[in-house]
Image (cartoon, coloured by chain):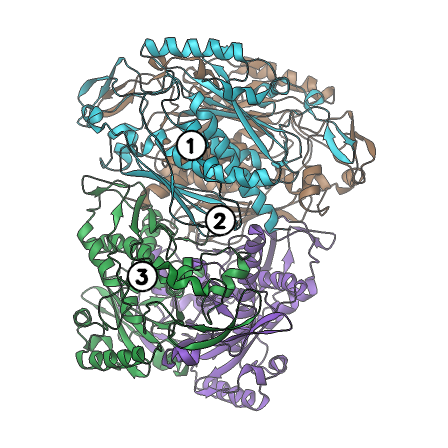
Chain colours: A brown, B cyan, C green, D purple
C-alpha cells in the first residue's frame, strides 16, 4: 500500500538497496506516447552515484530495462514495467550493522515495525536507491508534460549556511546542469562544491535546499480540499529520503507579511489573467492559477557519516557504530532530478484528473 | 475524489460556506468506541467563530448532529455521518463579488477549473468552514488515541514577527487554551493578541505558525516510501486553508547542521530505546520511533482584508475589490484545533494500518 | 472503506434502517450538469416501499434533500450530499430480535464482526434501506449518461419458476414501468403479481431475476485486467442486498456452447463495426464494443418471512424467531431501479476514466 | 489503475503475452512469512501450458524469479516483486492478425480504447498469460491462509453439457489434481477429457464451470455494503479471462426457492454457531459466517479456434480470420489454480482489513 503513488498516473515501486533489482510499474499512462528511452536513461544518469567526487563512489551503471507496456516505440496504455539490476553490491560492507541501529537511520523503526525482519544491507528498502524507480517513472511523466508545454526545473539553492539569495527569475536555471552541485550560479556552485568536499574529508555530512520552478502549467490543476496541488506536491517531496520540510510561494517567510502585502493582485494581459506578484507560488485554493509554480524542499544532512556514534543493538546493548561504506556527504545535487521526477508525477496525475471531469 | 482523506480511517467531507450544511462521513471507525458527543462538541467549539474580538464575528452555533453509525452511545463500525447546519448566512454580503475574483482567494482558480460553475458566497467550498467537518471527525480520532495513550497538543508559536522561541519541552502546553490566541506563554499571548487586534483595526491580516507535539506514540507508525508518517502529516497540514509550509523535527533549520550534530544517538532507558536529541522529530525513515513527534505549520495572512485591491471580473474587466463580510485577521488561533484534528486522523489511520499487518 | 464505491465518480453512503437518516456524498461529479431534482425524486419513488400490495407496507415518503454541491440549479464540481430522513420508524417492531439472530440475515455476522455492537433495528446498516442512497446518486449518473445518449433499462424476467423467455430485443422494455412487478410482458407480469401476492399471503418470500440492457454505450468503456467492465458491473450488482449471482451476455448458458457458435463475427455497417450475434453481451476483454450491454442479476427470496424459524440468541440459547414487521415478499420489483442506479454509477466512472487517458 | 487489485494486500501486475516478461508486485504482505519458493513454483506449474494434450502446446517453463521483499527466506513487509521471463515467443505466429480483429477477442476493443496502439502478438495484455502474475501472488496469499487454517479447493464441475452433479460434500476434492481435467470424479474426468480432446481435433473450443470451496474461514470476513465478501469474490472471478458468470451459495437456482426453504436455520454445536443448510454459501450480509464458502464461475468457450471466421480489419475491410497458434480448447483445467489464487488474494485482504479494525 505504501509503495504506490498517484491516483490515475500511478507508480508502484519495489526493490531494496542490495536485493536483486529496483524497479517500478507505471500504470495509467496514456497510449501513443513516444517512449524515448534515451531521455529516460539520461534522467537516471542525472541521479546515479559517482558523478563527481562529492557524490558517493559506488559504481552503479543504472541501465534500465523496460519489460512491458510499450510496442514499436510507443506506449500502449498498459502497465509499463521498468527495472534496474543492482550491480555493485558490496553487501559485506554492511554485515557489521546487521544487528546495530545506526543513529537517525530507519534501522530501528523498521526493526520494530516488521518484527525484526529486515534486509539491513545498505538500508534495504529505506535506501535512497529506491528513487531510481521514481526517476524512471518521472521521466515518462516529463515526456507527457513536454507535449503540453510544461517545464520543470529544480536546482540547489542552499548547502549548509551557503545560500543563493538571487530570486529564480534572475537566474539561468539551465546553468545548474553545468556543475556538480546543480546550483545555477557558477560562483556559488564552486563555493558549495568546496564546502561539501571539505565536509566529506571530515567524514561528515551537511544538509541543503532544492528549489523547484514549474512553468507553462495551465490554470485549473489541483483539487479542492484534501488533494490540493501544493498538498500533493508537499507529500511527494516529503516522501523523498532525508526531506525535513516543504514550502511553496512565500512559504514560512509569508507568515510575517500582512495580507495587504501578500495578496497577489490580478490584471489582464493579452487576454490572460496574471498576478502582479506571486506569493501564492502559482497555486490558489489548492489549484494552479497559471503563474509559475514555485516550491522549496529542505534536506537534512544524511545520517551516514564516517565517525563513531553511540547506539544500541537489537538486544539493547550499547554499541559504537562506525561509518563504513560509500555515501554522499550532501544529497542535494543528486536530489535535483528526484524532486523534478516527483513533481512531474504529481502534475500528470492532476492533468489527467482534470481531463476526467471535463 | 478530492474530498476524501485516509485509507482505513477515512473521512469524506461536504458542504459550502453558505449552502445548507457542512458535514462528514467517517468510514472505517472501529466498533465499540464510546461516542462522547460532549467532547466532539467541545472540539467544534474550539474552532467556531466569534470566540473573541480577534476572530470573525460571524455567529455560528456549530452544533453538530449525528445521523448514523452509533447505537446506544457506542460506534457500530458503520459510517458515522455528522453534520452542522449553516446558520448565520448573510449571503447578500457576497453578491458584490459574484463575478469578481478576490486576490489570492480561490475565486479565479475554481472559476477556471469548473467552467464558471461555482458558489461564490463566502468562498463556497474553498471556505475554511469546511474544516468543521475535519474537526468533528478528528474528535472521534482523538477518542481512539486517548485509549492508547496518545496525546496531541498544538499551539501558536508565531504571529507576524512575534516568535515564541522557548522550546516546547519548557512550556506548559495546556496553558495555550487559557487565552484567545492559543499561545502557551501568557505574556507572548498578550503581545500577539494586541498585534492581531491592531491588524484587525487596520482592516488587514497577518500570518502565523502553529506548532504541534504528539506524545505517547508507539514506535512503528508510518509506512516506508510514499506514505511516510511525516509525508502524510505534511499533506494533511498543507490541505488546511491558508497553509504555506510544513516542517518536522529540525525542519528547514536542519539543513545548516552537520550530520555529526544532527544524528540522534540511541541509548536504552528502562528497556526502552531513546534518543539523546530529537532532531528527527520522532520520525525516522518515515516511521515513528517512540519519541515525541514534533512539527510546525506555516499559515499565510488570510486573503480577505478590508482594503481596496485591484483585480478583474469574469469578463476580464479591471475591478476594485473592496473587503466586506466578517473575517479573521489571523487564522492561527482557530487553526490550532484543526491542526490537531488532522494529526489525529493521520495517526489513527496509520495505527490501523499497522494492526492490519500484525 | 466499505461504504465507498467508484474511483472517479465516487459515492459514500451512510445510514441505518432506523437511524436518523440515510444519505450519500457523491464526489467527482463534473460541474455544470443540470441538477434535475424532479428526476432524482422520481427515481427514488420507483424504489420506495408501499407502491402496491406486493411490496412492503412501510410508509416512507423518501423525499430527498440536497445539502451541497449544487448552485443555481447546476452541479459545481464539489461533493453533492443528498439525504432522506428516516420517517416511519416502528423501532419497537424489532425489540424482540435485539438479541436474536434471524436466519439468513446479517444479524449473526455483524454481531461477530463488530463485537456485539450493532443497531439491530430493521437490520441496521444491512437493511436495503441503504439503497436509497444508491438510487439518488445513480439518478445523477443517469443525468450524465442521458447527455451522451446512453440508456439503461432493467426489468424483471423471472419470479420463482415463472420465466419470461422472450429475448429483450423483442420486448418493449418501457412497458415494464406500467405494472407493479416491472415485467415488460403484461400477461407474465400479472401471473408474477398473483404469484407474489399468494406467497405474501402464506407469509413466505420468493426470489427472482432482474435483466438489464444498456444501449448507446460507446466502444472503449472498461479497463483491462482487474477493472473489466463486466467485473465492475458484477461487483456492483453483487453488492446489492439479496443478490446471489451475476452473468452477462451468454452467461452460464454459454459454457455449453462451442467457440464456433459463441464467437461474435464482426462486420461493418455504415462505417460502424457491428457483431452478427452478441453472446459477448457488448463486452470483449472487459471493454465495451459498442453493442448492447446485457446482464442478469439473481435475487434470493428475502430472508424475512412471517413464519417461525429456529435459531439462537447472542448467548447461544436456542430460540424461535417469528417474523414481524413489514417486508417485501419478493424484492425484484423494487430492485429494478437499484440495478439501473448501480449500472449508471459504473458506466459514468468508466466514462470519466476514459476521458482521463485521452 | 486497472492493473492493481486489493486494498491492503495489493497486487499490481504487468506484462504482455509476447513482451519481455510478466510479473507482479505484491505490496502489503506482512513480514516474517516463510517464503516457500517451491510452493509458489508448484502453483505456477499447475497453471502452465503443455500439461497434457488438452492444453495448449506452448512450452513455457514459467520459472519465477523474486526480485525484492524477502530476506533470508522470509518476507520483510516490503513489496515482493516476482517475474517470469517470456520464453517460447513465436511472435511471427501473430503477424497475420496485426491489423485484423479476431471475433470475440479483445482486439477490436483495445484498438478503439488505445487509439490503435496495441501489442497484437498473442493478445498482448489481454492474454491469459497475465494470470501467471496472479497465481504467483495468490500462492503467497495461500501461504498466509495456511497459517490460519483456511483451505481453498477449486475443481472443474462442468465441461460443455457434461455436468458433475454430485455435491462437493460427497467428493474427495483432492482427487481433482489426479487428472488433466481437474475434475474430482475420475469417471467424469475421463469423459470430459475425451470431449475436450474431440473438440480440439475439430479445431473448436468449449466452455466449462469451475466450482470453489473454502473451508476453515473465520466468521466476520467481508465488509458491509459495497465490499461484500461475495461481491469482491465475484469481481475477482469476473476479472479472469473468459469468465461470463458468477454465483455463490444457492446462486441462480436460489431464485426459484421460497424463503422458508432457503433460509439457513442456526443452531449451536460445541459452542459454535452452525447452520442446518448452507444456501448462503457461507456468506450473510456480505460477511462470512464460518460455514464453507462455496461459489461457481462460468467460463465461455475460448475465442481462438482453428476455423475460418468473418471479421474486419483496422481499415474496416472484410477479412477472413483463420486460427493459428497454439491454444487451449477448454480453459477450465488451467483455470482452477487461477480461481484459487484470486480467492486467496480476496480472503487475505479481508482478513487484514478485519485485523485493522480490531
- Residues at marks 2 and 3, CA–CA distance in whole angstroms: 32 Å
Q: Which mark is residue B75?
A: 2
- Say what secondary structure mark 3 lies in: helix
Q: Are marks 1 and 3 on the same chain?
A: no
Q: Are marks 1 and 2 in contact (CB under 8 Å)?
A: no
Classify mark 3: residues with Cα within 10 Å, few (<14), some (14-19) or many (20+): many
The subunit letter for the residue under badge 2 reads B
Tell which tag, 2 or 3, sits nearer the viewer: 2
Rendered position, C76 above or below D310: above
Depth check: give the residue in front, C27 or A134.
C27
Residue sitting at x 32%, y 50% = C352
The x and y percentages for residue B276 are 73, 24
Residue sitting at x 48%, y 58% = D223
Q: Earlier in the sequence, mark 1 or mark 2?
A: 1
Dividing the picture into quadrants, the one containing residue B2 is top left
Residue A153 in sight in this render: yes
Residue D61 in sight in this render: no
Q: Which residue is mark 3?
A: C343
Say whether residue A97 is left or right of residue C139: right
Q: Are marks 2 and 3 in contact (CB under 8 Å)?
A: no
Depth check: give the residue in front, C325 or A294.
C325
Q: Which residue is mark 1?
A: B44
Amino acid at each position: 500500500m505504501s509503495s504506490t503513488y498517484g491516483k490515475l498516473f500511478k507508480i508502484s515501486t519495489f526493490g531494496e538497496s542490495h536485493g536483486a533489482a529496483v524497479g517500478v510499474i507505471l500504470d495509467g499512462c496514456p497510449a501513443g506516447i513516444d517512449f524515448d528511452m534515451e531521455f529516460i536513461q539520461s534522467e537516471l544518469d542525472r541521479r546515479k552515484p559517482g558523478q563527481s567526487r562529492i557524490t558517493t563512489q559506488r559504481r552503479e551503471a543504472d541501465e534500465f530495462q523496460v519489460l512491458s507496456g510499450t510496442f514499436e516505440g510507443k506506449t500502449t496504455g498498459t502497465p509499463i514495467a521498468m527495472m534496474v539490476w543492482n550491480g555493485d553490491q558490496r553487501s559485506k560492507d554492511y554485515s557489521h550493522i546487521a544487528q546495530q541501529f545506526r543513529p537517525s537511520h530507519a534501522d530501528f523503526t523498521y526493526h520494530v515495525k516488521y518484527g525484526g525482519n529486515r534486509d539491513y544491507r545498505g538500508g534495504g528498502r529505506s535506501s535512497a536507491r529506491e528513487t531510481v524507480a521514481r526517476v524512471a517513472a518521472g521521466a515518462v511523466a516529463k515526456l507527457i508534460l513536454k507535449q503540453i508545454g510544461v517545464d520543470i526545473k529544480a536546482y540547489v539553492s542552499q548547502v549548509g549556511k551557503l545560500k543563493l539569495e538571487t530570486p529564480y527569475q534572475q537566474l539561468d536555471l539551465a546553468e545548474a546542469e553545468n556543475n556538480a552541485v546543480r546550483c545555477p550560479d557558477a560562483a556559488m556552485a564552486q563555493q558549495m562544491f568546496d564546502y561539501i568536499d571539505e565536509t566529506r574529508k571530515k567524514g561528515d555530512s551537511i544538509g541543503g535546499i532544492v528549489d523547484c520552478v514549474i512553468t507553462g502549467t495551465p490554470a485549473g490543476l489541483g483539487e479542492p480540499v484534501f488533494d490540493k496541488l501544493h498538498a500533493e506536491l508537499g507529500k511527494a517531496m516529503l516522501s523523498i529520503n532525508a526531506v525535513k520540510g516543504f514550502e511553496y510561494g512565500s512559504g514560512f517567510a509569508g507568515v510575517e507579511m500582512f495580507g495587504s502585502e501578500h495578496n497577489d493582485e490580478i490584471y489582464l494581459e493579452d487576454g490572460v489573467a496574471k498576478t502582479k506578484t506571486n506569493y501564492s507560488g502559482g497555486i490558489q485554493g489548492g489549484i494552479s492559477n497559471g503563474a509559475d509554480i514555485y516550491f522549496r524542499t529542505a534536506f537534512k544532512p544524511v545520517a551516514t557519516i564516517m565517525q563513531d556514534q553511540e547506539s544500541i543493538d537489537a538486544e539493547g546493548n550499547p554499541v559504537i557504530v562506525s561509518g563504513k561504506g560509500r555515501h554522499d556527504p550532501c544529497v542535494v545535487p543528486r536530489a535535483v532530478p528526484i524532486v523534478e521526477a516527483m513533481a512531474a508525477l504529481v502534475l500528470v496525475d492532476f492533468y489527467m484528473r482534470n481531463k476526467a471531469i471535463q
